């Protein structure tokens, strides 16, 4: 019985995992972002992670801060830090820069099935 309750709890946590916002990976041969963030309805920025994938970095953002069903406007921003690449007799430097995505409409309808009601009987 204890194992069954643990399994039900585990499955409910997996089923209710927060969605993730992600962008296409940045190819390793080009400029790489040093940070990423997103906003919800123009609010304050929420930090994202930069995940190393085959060929570069991919921004991924956990949307756990969205806690109620509704329609939201999301905007992701990436930042590249300034830096220089030195080669013999030359250097190529880039300035700090940011780029934002076009606004993205996200609609969360909420759970389409209510959670189970558990009871324990002797």
Image: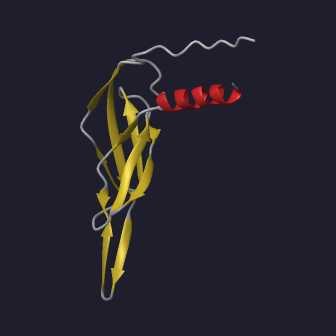
The residue closer to the viewer here, 27 or 31, is 27
**Residue 55 point in image, percent of width and height:** 32, 64
The residue closer to the viewer here, 6 or 27, is 6
Q: Residue at x 69, y 24 (%)?
A: 1
Q: Residue at x 39, y 16 (%)?
A: 112
* Outermost residue to the bottom: 88
Vertical arrangement, residue 103 with respect to residue 93, above or below? above
Here the colouring is: secondary structure
Vertical arrangement, residue 92 with respect to residue 30, above or below? below
**Residue 90 point in image, percent of width and height:** 29, 83
The residue closer to the viewer here, 4 or 27, is 4
* Outermost residue to the left: 102
**Residue 72 point in image, percent of width and height:** 34, 24
Task: Give the quarter of the image for residue 108.
Answer: top left
Q: Which residue is drawn at 58% across and 26% down?
A: 8
**Residue 122 point in image, percent of width and height:** 75, 12
Task: Give the quarter of the image for residue 56.
Answer: bottom left
Task: Give the quarter of the image for residue 2.
Answer: top right
The residue closer to the viewer here, 82 or 14, is 14
Total number of numbered discs in the rendering: 0
Q: Is residue 93 left or right of residue 64?
A: left
* Outermost residue to the right: 122
Vertical arrangement, residue 40 with respect to residue 47, above or below? above
């Amino acid at each position: 019985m204890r194992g069954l309750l643990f399994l039900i709890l585990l499955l409910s946590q997996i089923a209710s995992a927060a969605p993730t916002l992600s962008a296409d990976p940045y190819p390793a041969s080009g400029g790489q972002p040093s940070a990423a963030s997103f906003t919800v309805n123009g609010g304050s920025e929420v930090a994202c992670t930069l995940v190393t994938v085959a060929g570069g970095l991919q921004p991924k953002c956990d949307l756990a801060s969205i806690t109620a069903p509704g329609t939201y406007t999301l905007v992701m921003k990436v930042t590249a830090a300034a830096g220089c690449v030195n080669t013999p007799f030359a250097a190529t430097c880039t300035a700090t820069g940011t780029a934002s995505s076009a606004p993205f409409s996200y609609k969360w309808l909420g759970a389409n099935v209510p959670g189970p009601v558990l009871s324990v009987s002797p």
